[in-house]
Structure formats: C-alpha cells, structure tokens
Amino acid sequence: MGLDEAIRRGLAPDGGLYLPTEVPRLPSGYFHGAGDLASVAARWLEPFAAGSRLAGAVGGLAAEALAIPAPLVAVADRTWALELWHGPTAAFKDVGARFLAEALGFLRAHADPPVTVLVATSGDTGGAVAAAFHRRPGFRVGILFPKGLVSPTQERQLTCWDDNVVSCAVRGTFDDCQRLAKAAFQDQSLAERFRFTSANSINIGRLLPQAAYYAAASLMVWGQCREPLSFVIPSGNLGNAFGAVLARAAGLPIGDIVLAHNRNRPVVDFLETGVWNPRPSVPTIASAMDVGDPSNFERFRSWYPAPGALARTIWADSVDDEAIRARIRGDWPALGRVWCPNTATAAEVLARLRTRGGAGGHWAIVATAHPAKFPEVVEPLVGHSIERPASLAGLFGRPARSVEIDPTIAALAAAL
Ligand SMILES: *Cc1c(COP(=O)(O)O)cnc(C)c1O
C-alpha cells in the first residue's frame, strides 16, 4: 500500500497502525542546500511517497504546510533548544497537523459528503488539527477532549472554533477519548456515514514530517562541528519521539534519543523491566503528556521486537510535578528561558543526565510548546506574565463553543 492510502485511512482495517515497510538510507549530501524545515521536509518525504499518488507532490505540499520556523537555539554550552512552537497554535503538533491537512486536501479534493477528521486530544493536538482544517472545503473536524482535565487555557484553544469544527468535552479521561475515537472508526455504519479519517498520531501522515525537524537540527550541528546531536523529547503518545527514531534510522547524524515522561511512565518501566504494563493516565501539570497507554508504542515494538532491543535504541526517564516546577523556577533566572511544563520535563531529564556524566556532546531539549499555552502553571513559578505569540492571542479572542458528551458511540454520533 502506498503512503496516500495509509494517510487516507489513518488506521488499518484490522485496527493496526501503518509503518513504512523500509526506511531509506539517505546518502550523505542528500539534504545539501536544504536548511529550513519546509525544504528539508520536502526532500525527507519524497522517498516515502515513491510509487503513491503523492509522489512528486509531497515537496509542494510540505512547502505549503511547513513554512514554519523550527530554530535550534543555543541555551548553554553544548545545550540547545529545538523550538517547535512557532506555528499557528504554538505547539509542535502544528507541523504534523498542517502537513496532514495539506496531504488529505490533495488526496480528497472536493470530497462530497465531507470527510470527518476525528481527533482525541490531551490538549495541543485538537487545536493544531482544528487550525489546520478550519474552513477547509470537504472536511469537518470532531475534537474529543477530556472534560476538566485540560487547563482552562488549553480548553479555550480547543473550543474557539466554528463552522466545520465540533468540540466535544468528553466525561472521562484522555484514554477514554482515544478509545472512543478508535471505536468510532471501527463502527462500520458510523464510519460510512461520517467518512471518518484520523488525525491522531496514529496517522502516519502526522509522524513522517516530524522527522524533518530532527533532520534539519542535526544537520545544522553536524555542519558546524561534525558532531552528532542528541535529543531529549517530552513524550506522551510517542509520536514526536518516533520521528527522531525514524530520522536516525535513515542515517541522520543523531546521537542518543531520550524520552522525558511525566509520572505517566509505562515506557520508562518497560525499558527497565521488559514488561509492558499500560495503565490509566494520571493528571500532571505537563498535561499534554498525560498518556497511560501510548498508541504509538506498538510501532516501536514492531520495529524492535527482540527483548532488550528497544532499550538499546532509546532511553527514558520520568519526572514528577515538583521537579517540573523546580526546573521552570530555576531555569528562568539561570538560563533566561521560560519552559512550558512539558518542555521542562526534558530540561530536567537532561540536567540529571549531565549531573551523572551521562550526557557528553551536543544535546537539544525539544521545546514542544510555548509557555504562554500554560500560564496557570508557569506564571506563578517565574513571577511574571508570559506574553502570548500573536497567533495565540488571535485564537483567544474568539468565543468558546463545545458540546458535553459521555464516552459512547451514540453520544458522539448525536454531537456530530
Ligand atoms: C503532544 C505533546 C507532547 C507529547 O508528544 P507525543 O508525540 O504525544 O509523545 C509533548 N509536549 C507537548 C506540548 C505536546 O503538545
């Protein structure tokens, strides 16, 4: 099956997730002359699209969707921040969501009746997907978010839409939202009626472009000093981390890949014990990462099935709320940086690694969101208010609209 079909379907008919059958080994010099996210992504995506309806088109789609800065900013000696929050909703999810919208728009031009993009979100996905599909002809969007479990500011970003976007406040957890989305896809009659497609990170169309910023950042450091760049990635559903693993597998100069989790730590435990024990998510202040049963884990497992193989590929650590708070409080005066709570988990994990002498060379803290998305947490810690990027300020000016539902298929159908 080609990339076009995998993107169009989102989820395989048997409920499984799509993966590339092989990862291209890109020759050195492959990205020569490409530097920004859009141009690196255009070249990165081309081999994956080969043989599909997207072949020859992905370059243009990436240029259209990914004209977003993703700067690698020096923070301290051999320490960088990879800022992934310069898109319209100020989180890294804009990258995948915008490419997906562009690709689906290309593949489903003039869809009639419209396709419904269904997305379960713990915060940032819903806003990014809504922004990417808002008023796009041929598409409707259904956002499922756990009522009361996202911050008031997050909730505003999920409910500030109109026209073709329906925001559902689900009485349950993020895992309930995710289960409901999965059940809706597998419900034949509902899926036919609404022509569902997924924009969660189960859709390979969101994951693939996320490798491009790892490629671009590592190439920049390699160009400057011929050294690989290692990454600490704030992780929940593991979609972002999957991009890094993919880029490294394709031969990009990436060193270690470390996942920073909050107290939701099934991945950390798996790497330590070899036992996969997903559990209900627990709420933390790094709420975008509150995932107890990460859906992309099956992708990692399928690529690294042997016992211990995954633990030789990535490393992970877990950080509690107190450590997140302390990191935000301390790094503001020490580095002049205000982290969002999710990013702070990565800053904390890197600091611990450095203290233990386990992190030589160049490291990037992956800054997954702008701190202005989490003012309730961040402002009291740094003692001043955080200015919103202009795009966020625009969203916050819009009126809020949502429908409250139980996590059942019937309630979802009624809301849509
Ligand atoms: C979604 C999100 C994460 C977690 O990313 P995954 O791909 O789900 O692992 C981390 N930080 C922020 C700000 C997010 O929005």
Image (spheres, rainbow, N blue to C red):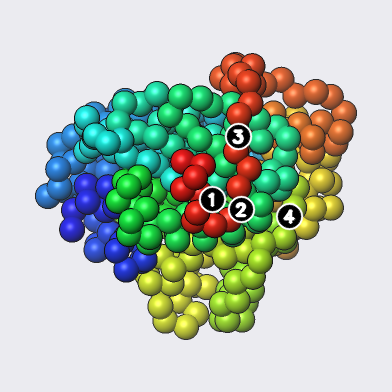
Apparent side of residue 158 relative to residue 99 in the rendered image (left or right): right
Labels 1 and 4 touching (C-beta < 8 A): no
Spatial separation of the CA atoms under disc 3 and disc 1: 14 Å
Asked if labels 2 and 4 touch by Cβ distance under 8 angstroms, the answer is no
- The kind of residue on which mark 3 rests is Ser
Q: Is residue 245 left or right of residue 64?
A: right
Q: What residue is drawn where x is 64% and y is 16%?
A: 397
User: Mark 3 near ligand 1 (CB under 8 Å)?
Assistant: no
In the rendered structure, find residue 402 and report the number of the disc placed on it.
Answer: 3
* Front position in the image: 28 or 117: 117
| Residue placed under numbered mark 1 in the picture | 411
Cα–Cα gap, marks 2 and 1: 6 Å
Which residue is rendered at x = 30% and y = 51% of the image?
192
Question: Looking at the picture, does residue 355 appear above or below residue 164?
Answer: below
**In the rendered view, would you say 72 is above or below 261?**
above
Going from N to C along the chain, the mark reached first, 4 or 2, is: 4
Does label 3 or label 4 sit earlier along the sequence?
4
C-beta proximity under 8 Å, tags 3 and 1: no
Q: Residues within 10 Å of mark 1 (few under 14, many from 20)?
A: some
Residue 305 or residue 308, whichever sits in front: 305
Disc number placed over residue 406 in the picture, else none: 2
- From the image, state whether disc 3 or disc 4 is nearer to you: 3
Instruction: Tell me the SS state at disc 1.
Output: helix
Whether pointer 3 and pointer 4 mark residues with C-beta atoms closer than 8 Å, the reply is: no
Q: Secondary structure at mark 4?
A: loop
Residue 283 image label: 4
